[in-house]
Amino acid sequence: MAKLDFSPIADTTRRAEIVALLRRAILTGQLEPGQKLNELRISEQMRVSRAPLREAMRELVQEGVLTSIPYAGTFVIEVTAKDIIDAYSLNQVLDEFAIEKTWPQRDQRFFDELDRRHEAVKQATRAKDTTRQIETALQLHGLIYEWADNSVLLETWQRLTSRLQMYFALHQRARNEPVPAEDVHETYVALLKGADMRAAQRHARQHIGLDFEELLAYARGLEKRASKN
Amino acid sequence: MAKLDFSPIADTTRRAEIVALLRRAILTGQLEPGQKLNELRISEQMRVSRAPLREAMRELVQEGVLTSIPYAGTFVIEVTAKDIIDAYSLNQVLDEFAIEKTWPQRDQRFFDELDRRHEAVKQATRAKDTTRQIETALQLHGLIYEWADNSVLLETWQRLTSRLQMYFALHQRARNEPVPAEDVHETYVALLKGADMRAAQRHARQHIGLDFEELLAYARGLEKRASKN
DNA sequence: GACAAGCAGATTGTCGACAATCTAACAAGA
DNA sequence: TCTTGTTAGATTGTCGACAATCTGCTTGTC
């Protein structure tokens, strides 16, 4: 018999679908930071009872994109400048580690996948689909984590990604500008294919630092608005 | 009026208590890796309905100490040698980062807290309370994370800690030996009080590496047993 | 005896209803 | 006017029952 590896079949619980729906709504900014999630209203809209909805919300709380106060409600997390700084500085450290672990494991499959994801970003950019652009850019960036062969690291990155995606989405949504058409990932991809690991690590630090400044400015704006209340 | 800052009052939901109970049972090794958690049985034992129990289990799944398969059940995670290696190597990186961030913020309160936690470890060691010894040692270790002033880093550490605690507990339980009476944290504490940050970082790497070898041997043993089935 | 179909029991997933708690508006008193 | 007590409404937390799914056994067939 030919050895064929099937992917696990999809989770067919309502809970899993609710998690996906809610996560997407949060990460694309459709649900705004600080907003309260009314269980009854949402469960009616989704045509689902509160039980699986509540379980889904528990997962997202643990995932870090929701926060829950007993008997008061569950809310989308607030975004502060400090949160963004914290997430980014940790991300830099993890990037370095991921690159180090991935480096000796790079092979043709890695390079192919790298190109594939890079292409996906370019396509989303051409289509001016900002949401998808953010998604694909993070997926491109996540490859080094998937290749690092460290399950705990990968988990950590995925948690971090949720927030980064949310931050970027809010940022994009706020400035409401056409996205940059130039390809900012060209150098990154080239360095990952190259022979100088240190250079790749350095670039990851700086490359990330680029959008960081903008993001930070946005977060500071948020805080200023909040303090006026 | 005297300015007194109250700590937030405790969560008084059944769910929160169930989470605490289950987590403790898992992290102390009372619930063995791979073991299935029967919802009905547990809910009856705790005199609680399945709803809050299930929500609690969702949290622990997301926390990484349980794993869930739809319509099949929820299980305590299995521990493999690779998991331990992964957790440890990430922990080393995070330690370095935490020390770096904590370093300029060290003050008298930090040193006092350091001594307090160190004392707690020594006390647990004298009392030969292995469970508590693991707990307090991890708390001592966690101080640099609390002091680093990076919420995302702290979260990450707490997730990692859960597993580390579980690994240590299983290890202790397996070898069933009296715990080391000598104080292995003396140098670590001294270095954190000192002036040489690099030295502290180096020691964190090595100090952790110490028990690591033993832990790894235990994990390898586990895998050997598993493969016999 | 080997094997597939089908059935029974157990377990998880989901539902609708009730209990506990919070919030905000209002009334009463200093 | 400010504070405190009360109450009604809304919302979250919890419960017990039902539906969907899985597992292992039995039965029948070859």
Image: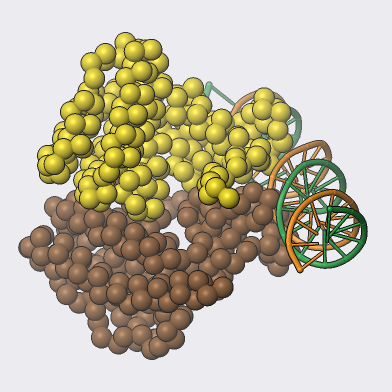
Chain colours: A brown, B yellow, C green, D orange
| Closer to us: A203 or B98 | B98
Q: Is residue A33 left or right of residue B153?
A: right
| Closer to us: B227 or A21 | A21
| Image quadrant assignment for residue B226 | top left
Examine the rendered structure and indicate whether residue B222 appears above or below residue A224: above
Examine the rendered structure and indicate whether residue A77 appears above or below residue A133: above
Write the residue at 17% across / 75% down.
A187
Write the residue at 33% across / 23% down.
B119
Q: Can the viewer see residue B214 in this picture?
A: yes
Q: Residue B166 placed where, x, y %?
A: 40, 30
Q: Residue A120 placed where, x, y %?
A: 33, 75
Q: Residue B137 placed where, x, y %?
A: 33, 28
Quadrant in which the C terminus of chain A appears: bottom right
Q: Can the viewer see residue B93 in this picture?
A: no
| Image quadrant assignment for residue C24 | bottom right
Q: Is residue A74 left or right of residue A213?
A: right
